[in-house]
Image: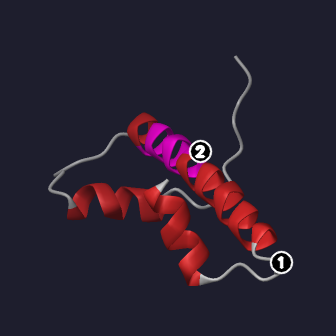
Amino acid sequence: MPVKKHRLPLAPFERILKDAGAKRVSKTAMKEFATMTEEIADDLARDAVKFAKHAGRKTVTGEDIRLAKRK
């Protein structure tokens, strides 16, 4: 199985899990959480870009992000 290179560092994902109540977080848990979060963020970003383009803009706004989240 190929190794997935994350675009973001893993430490913030560990902090998120710990802030959610985890006492300890394995490296595999951090990697999986990062992978899933990046996939969700990619989908959200693509949808937000579609909203901006539909509105005739090149700039993605906070409202585009909010609309994409509701989709």
Residue farthest to the top, as pictured: 1
Picture mark count = 2
Image coords of residue 18 (percent x, y)? 24, 59
Image coords of residue 57 (percent x, y)? 82, 81
The residue positioned 16% from the left and 52% from the top of the image is 23
Which residue is denoted by mark 1 in the rendering?
A: 56
Marks 1 and 2 sit apart, C-alpha to C-alpha, by: 26 Å
Q: Is residue 52 left or right of residue 16?
A: right
What secondary structure is marked by label 2?
Answer: helix
Is residue 28 part of the magenta span, yes or no? no
Which residue is denoted by mark 2 in the rendering?
A: 39
Observer-nearest of 54 and 50:
54
**Colour style of the rendered protein structure:** secondary structure
Q: Is residue 42 left or right of residue 71?
A: right
The residue positioned 57% from the left and 56% from the top of the image is 41
The range drawn in magenta is 30-39
| Residue 8 lies in quadrant | bottom right
Image coords of residue 6 (percent x, y)? 66, 49
The residue positioned 51% from the left and 48% from the top of the image is 34
